[in-house]
Amino acid sequence: PGYVHNATTLHNNPPVFNTSGIQCGPNDATMQLLTQRVYVDLAAHERANKLVLEGGGGKPRAKIFCHIYTTQKQRPRIQSIRETWGHRCDGFHVASTITDRSIDSVNIPHEGEEAYKN
């Protein structure tokens, strides 16, 4: 059998955020995105979601599925995405030119060269 992708693996098992080897300056926008935290009141979110699930009214929270298309050349960027924001998605999928279980990428064949606007 072939590889069967589980879109919730990253959400359920987030990797450790590793800043070693990041090539950005101490105050550039990339470093700020990687190191500054945005506060989200997760406890309030979970309480509200629990009320909905128990029939207490309100709307259930939206689920977010994140999909990225990349090529083998851009593969190193995927690990950074997985470590920073990818695990916050309810489902996460990487389409690529190769199947690589270590980053949960699945080969999606297409016609033509690897280029934008293809």
Image (spheres, helix red, strand yellow):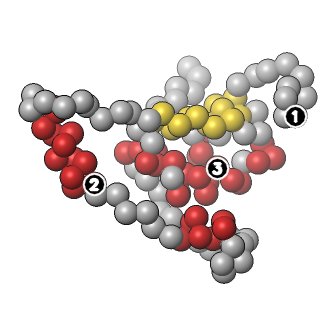
Q: Which residue is mark 2?
A: 42
Looking at the rendered structure, the kind of residue marked 1 is Ala
Please, what is the three-letter code of the amino acid marked with disc 2? Answer: Leu
Q: Residue at x 55, y 51 (%)?
A: 82
Is 69 above or below relative to 33?
above
Marks 1 and 2, the one that precedes in the sequence: 2
Residue 30 falls in which quadrant of the image?
A: bottom right
Choose between 94 and 59: the one closer to the eye: 59
Q: Are marks 3 and 1 in contact (CB under 8 Å)?
A: no
Rounded to the nearest angstrom, the CA distance separating label 1 from label 2 is: 40 Å
Is 111 positioned to the left or the right of 84 in the image? right
Please tell me whether mark 3 sits on a helix, a strand or a loop: helix
104 relative position to 28: left or right? left
Q: Is residue 51 visible?
A: yes
Q: Looking at the image, which residue is at 79% across and 21% down?
A: 110
Residue reaching furthest bottom? 26
Q: Position of residue 102 (x, y in %)?
A: 59, 46
Instruction: Give the quadrant of residue 93.
Output: top right
Question: For residue 115, which numbered disc appears in the image?
Answer: 1
Residue 104 spot, x, y in % from top left: 57, 39
Looking at the image, residue 36 sits to the left or right of residue 111; the answer is left
Label 3 – label 1 distance at C-alpha = 18 Å
Q: Nearer the viewer, mark 2 or mark 3?
A: 2
Element type at marker 1? loop
Pointer 1 and pointer 2: residues touching (CB < 8 Å)? Answer: no
| Residue count near mark 3 (Cα–Cα under 10 Å), binned few <14, some 14–19, many ≥20 | some
Q: Is residue 93 above or below residue 85?
A: above
**Quarter in which the C terminus is drawn:** top right
* Residue 78 disc label: 3
Q: Nearer the viewer, residue 39 or 17?
A: 39
Residue 68 at x, y percent in the picture: 63, 37
